[in-house]
Image (cartoon, helix red, strand yellow):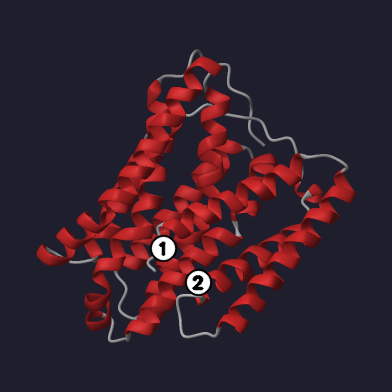
Amino acid sequence: MEIKSNSAKVGWTAAIIVSLSSFIISLDNTFMNVAISNLVVDLNTTIPVVQIIISVYALTMASLMLFGSKMQDVVGKKTTFIYGAIIFGIGTVIATFSVNAPMLLVGWSILEGIGAALMTPATASIIIGSYGEDRSTFAMAIRTSFASAGAGFGPIIGGFLTTFFSWRWGFGLEFFIILIILAFSSRLKTFPSNTNFSDLDIKGIIISSSGIFILVLGILSLNTSTTLEISSAIIGFGALLLIIFYLREKVLMCGIKYQLLILNSLTTVTSLLEHFPG
């Protein structure tokens, strides 16, 4: 459990630190798209396998977004963010030294996806909780600009590194940024947790995560040779699970907290898919 900080006014370093996480997450969504042919050769695999690895990253991040949001209540915003950064960093190391496709899948798609799902909700929460109403708007603008820069410069950075060095340097760059985040994490304001692990709604997490996973899988399948009927069925089943989750939480909580949470997560999924190659 975190102890509430009594520190004075938070400087802009905190906003920059959390915004760096948005940068590398956006970068992760784009920079490897230009290195697919190099991945096929270096890992002795095929294009469809690489495309699956890319898809699993999006699925992992999207499906665990609600879990990442809930963990803030259990262990605190700052702790959730740091855990996410550590997991993401471990993933970048494994991805950097990948010798085959399964190793890249574990490092990039799964571990980095989990880390991103923990950090993404915490970035906004930390900014809102650290700055007053008059300063939080500017802090959120910093975060948005960093995320946009990562998405915009991702293909350029990926193309440069792949052409003159190696795609592995891209993950190395992300690891270096993670080290900066962890080195300056003490500048982040500490927030208390307000929920115990025993209060964690495991069934709700499973239903919501499964629903988002299946929904995103159905949307991604529209870009493949899968028939429209099958894709529509997958999307419909995922949407059904999310509706069940919505109604279940509405009955259990009798409030709007979790209704807003699912809407925010769906917005994040939509934003994520905008950067996914068509």
- Name the residue at the left extreme: 164
Q: Where residue 179 appears, x then y in whole percent?
A: 34, 45
Would you name the residue on which mark 2 appears? 220
Image quadrant assignment for residue 217? bottom right
Residue 33 is marked as: none
- C-alpha span from label 1 to label 2: 9 Å
Image quadrant assignment for residue 167? bottom left
Local crowd size for mark 2, using a 10 Å CA cut-off: few (<14), some (14–19), many (≥20): many
Are the two marked residues, 1 and 2, in contact with CB atoms closer than 8 angstroms? yes
Taking depth in this image into account, of 201 and 242 the one nearest to the observer is 242
Would you name the residue on which mark 1 appears? 276
Q: Where residue 29 appears, x then y in whole percent?
A: 38, 59
Q: Is residue 52 left or right of residue 47?
A: right
Q: Where residue 196 appears, x then y in whole percent?
A: 77, 43
Q: Does any portion of residue 7 appear in the rendered image?
A: no
Local crowd size for mark 1, using a 10 Å CA cut-off: few (<14), some (14–19), many (≥20): some
**Image quarter in which the C terminus is found:** bottom left
Answer above or below: position of 234 versus 58: below
Asked which secondary structure carries label 2, the reply is helix
Q: Disc 1 or 2, which lies upstream in sequence?
A: 2
Residue at x 80%, y 62% (from the top left corner): 244
Asked which secondary structure carries label 1, the reply is loop
Q: Amino acid at mark 1?
A: Phe
Q: Where residue 84 appears, x then y in whole percent?
A: 50, 50
